[in-house]
Amino acid sequence: MKAYVATSGDPGDYWYSIRQVFSTREAAEAYEHGDNVEEFELLDAPPEVRDWHTITRTLGKDRELQHHSGREDFVGDPDRISVTVENNAHGPHQLIVEGWDLEKVQAAAEDEYVKFLAERDERAAEVVAGLDRIDVRVWYEADGRTVLETPIHSTADHFSVPHDMVCGQAGVDPSQSLHGRWFTVQRLTYTEADGFSVCENPNRDTLRSSSARVDA
């Protein structure tokens, strides 16, 4: 048997509240003071409680992998897997995989990560293929690495290449700071950049952080 709960506001909001409980959906939907109707199964006994596992992989500078589990009411499919991909325009992307069985959650998280990378690389290749010239800008430098902003990398990606490689290919004195300088590259993928030369007339509109952004 089911119960239909008429609520006001959105879950998590300060003003969220349960207004009335009905035995039919029709009655709950007809209730004047309800904004939404939530459906619940009426139980004869307390449900089993199990660990609900969440694996979150953050795709940014540190590419962290986190596992969290919490005790939840177990109702439904023991093999259930939930996958969420958060493409954040101004922050690191996240892949979130959840489920009851930790081994299956771990396996699904790895499979989804491989699929995510393949789709990301395919989109990046399409962007690069559409450019007449690949211009990149140095965002900052640290620990011998040059961090770039490119047509397929935003600042949130912290994509970097060796400072000495850039200088050697572009004919720049390696003792100089490259901060803010523009270069043209011959080859660009999501994980590599090669063939640097000094860019005198950069096309600023092609950078991913510009209005031409293409979310990964």
Image (tube, helix red, strand yellow):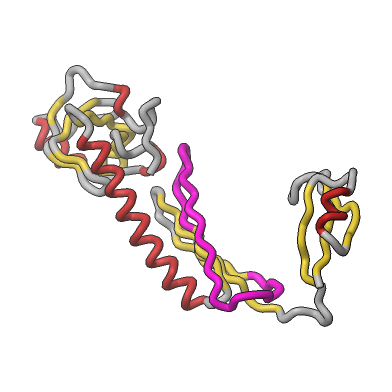
81 or 185: which is nearer to us? 81
| Residue 130 appears left or right of 47 | left
Q: Is residue 197 above or below residue 125?
A: above
Is 98 placed above or below 44 here? above
Name the residue at 31% across, 38% down.
Answer: 152
Is 166 on the left or on the right of 110, as rendered? left
Residue 112, picture quadrant: bottom left
The quarter of the displayed image where residue 108 is located = bottom left
Residue at left 21%, top 30%?
131
Residue 60: x and y in percent read: 41, 49
Q: Where does the image place residue 206, in percent across and percent down from the top left?
A: 29, 27
| On-image quarter of the N terminus | bottom right
- Per the rendered image, the range of residues in magenta is 70-95
The residue lying at 20 percent from left, 37 percent from top is 129
Q: Is residue 196 left or right of residue 140?
A: left
Residue located 38% across and 60% down the image: 113
- As displayed, is residue 78 above or below residue 12? below
